[in-house]
Amino acid sequence: MNVFYILPLIFLYLVSCTSRSELTVAVGGTSAEVSYWYKLIKRFEEEEGIEVRIIRQASDSDLRRQHLILSMISHLEDPDVFFMDVAWVGQFIYSGWLEPINLDTKPFFKGSIEVAYREGELYAVPVNIDCGLLYYRSDLLEEYGCDVPETWEELLECSLKAVDEDIYGFVWQGAQYEGLVCTFLEFSYSAGGDLGNINSEENLKALTFMRDIIRIHKISPPDTYVSMKEEEVRLIFQRGLALFERNWPYAYKLHKAENSPVKDKFGVAPLPRFEGGRRASCLGGWYIGLSRFSDRKEEGKKLIRFITSYEVQKDLVEGLGWNSPRIDVMEELGEKYAHLKVVREACNYAVARPPVPYYAQISYIIQKYVNGVLAGLIKPEEALSRMDKEIRELKEYYE
Amino acid sequence: MRMFYILNLPAFITVSLIILLPILGTFAISLFRFVTFSEPSFVGISNYLRLFSDEVFINSVLFTLKFVFFSVSAEIFLGIVLALLINEKIPLRGLFRGIVLLPWVIPSVVSGRVWEIMFNYSYGFLNFIAEIVADLRINWLGTEIGAFLSLVIADVWRTVPFVALIILAGLQSIPDEIYDQSKIDGAGSLSRFFFVTLPMIDVFILTALIFRTIDALRVFDIVFVLTGGGPSGSTTPLTLYAYKYYLSGDFGYGSAVSVILFLLTLLVSIFLFRVVGRR
């Protein structure tokens, strides 16, 4: 099959055409992130005496993934070390592109480390994590006489009071995109279901609830399934137009900003569960891994240990505002930044999306049908059984 | 005769290397179950069989054809109108010709971003106008029909200058004497256009048509930037569909999509070349 590798190989060789004697690490994302990495890697070079070359990637995550896939299928020696979104870790592990790493995983959140294991070997280490959170308006809760909801039923009850006052009860991500898989996963697990067994009573309960809070109880905006992504949801809550919001930890800093109308009027909590269910938070974040084709494996492992070490992780939280996958770091900084305590609790309930190599196709199926249910185009029962059938077919095809 | 082959050999080798080989390579991969997470295995035409029962693929073909039809028709029509305008002896003609070309000079990713900002629901320029004029907001990119029209508008805006340029070249090749003659014969401006201008530039129109059709079949950048294929995957051209499979690591299936797109483009080009060749 080598003939298929040759063309991209020649191309990449011509493009990169550099001496390949040093450790190479691929870095991308926002410019703040990138310059932070430059600083950190410089520190690593000084401490360890290892020379590191940085490959600048695009800021768009699909383009970063494309760059890595091309390098991997061409078995390139560079980059040696790179970052992966949690959603592609499965693909990279099952494609055999990653080198096992020896590392003490005890300080890390269990949910965040499980995805990176295959057959007893650790293939990637989380560098930052995200867990879904519930934001609430503390002033309004007091006014309506509600507690911070523990269950979705309580959330619904309290939200109905908000609807009477002409603001939305609960805003969340319902548009057809990756974020919808996360919200569906959270509702499903918190009802006691899971995504491994799609066609279940619990998932039916979850999906029906998601539809009904838009279409029957009307506590969520009517265009939830058309346009609600992270930023749309955040802006509605921030303008004071909603009682509850489901979002990632990044929204906290923005809600707290000087010019935010809800600056002193909101709180944050782990997401509710259904009565009789369990709490769940969708796991997001980035992982670091070492290429199997690397020619600098020992140095690469050192860099990974450095970046995931207690000291550096603390720096990343304070410098970039990230959430660390290390429990010890989150615990210590929780004393200083109160919201990190909540993030830490929510991350205890973290659930990863299925770490299968063909996850992208599964995600597409879930998005299509869940969005169809929210739009009222298909009944929850039928959507679940069709999802189940299509995912089964995928499994048969790929396994 | 042997000399002919020898002298053509370098060109043949070059063309083979840069065009034929990738096409054959893609076709070969499309016959394999070629996913990154397992060993490749030969599966014959099963990728193609899977394609034809794939609803999303069928919709993608239909979208591509619909997009080609609407955008190319509008481009040819507006291109002719624009070419006639800048062919007139108006003051500052050179300046106008320069301005008309501008959209074609802007990289399509950049113009895609600009249109995305114009079409934005909350702060877009178009909704700003719509709110003043009719007190309503249109969800341009949020509905199927809206997203489709937005793509056509953005593509037409960008490529009309190209069509106009080709047709302008045709217009300038028509000798003034023919117009003088037809005026003497009593032809009005409309019949001069239909019986003199149009027959004289039809080859140029067909050339523009071929270029634009082939380009529109392969549309990628403007869709990638403007709608990303949404909503509900309703604006996914074949190129973007294949790209999604490459990204998720299924190269066999992605290649099958590419091969179908190649065949479609080939068929359309042969058809159009035939029409031109007959003239």
Image (tube, rainbow, N blue to C red):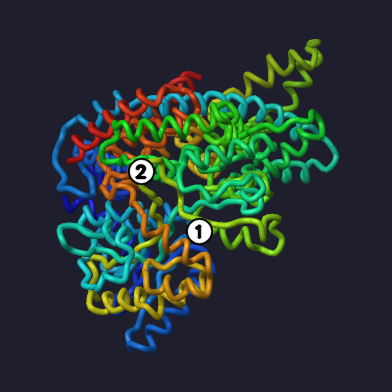
Residue at the spot 53% in from the left edge and 24% down from the top edge: B69
Q: Are marks 1 and 2 in contact (CB under 8 Å)?
A: no
Check the image and report above or below for A282 versus A222: below
Of all chains, the one bearing label 2 is A
Q: Secondary structure at mark 1?
A: loop
* Residue at mark 1: A249
Quadrant where the N terminus of chain B sits is top left
Near-viewer residue (A275 or A205): A275
Q: Is residue A268 left or right of residue A110?
A: right
Residue at the spot 52% in from the left edge and 34% down from the top edge: A225
Q: Earlier in the sequence, mark 1 or mark 2?
A: 1
Of all chains, the one bearing label 1 is A
Residue B254: image quadrant is: top left
Residues behind callouts 1 and 2 on a single chain: yes
Identify the disc placed on residue A277: 2
Q: Secondary structure at mark 2?
A: loop
Residue located farthest toward the top when viewing the structure as drawn: B186
Q: Nearer the viewer, mark 1 or mark 2?
A: 2
Residue at the spot 36% in from the left edge and 88% down from the top edge: A47
Residue B72 on image: x %, y %: 56, 28
Identify the disc placed on residue A194: none
Q: Amino acid at mark 1?
A: Pro
Residue located farthest toward the right when viewing the structure as drawn: B91
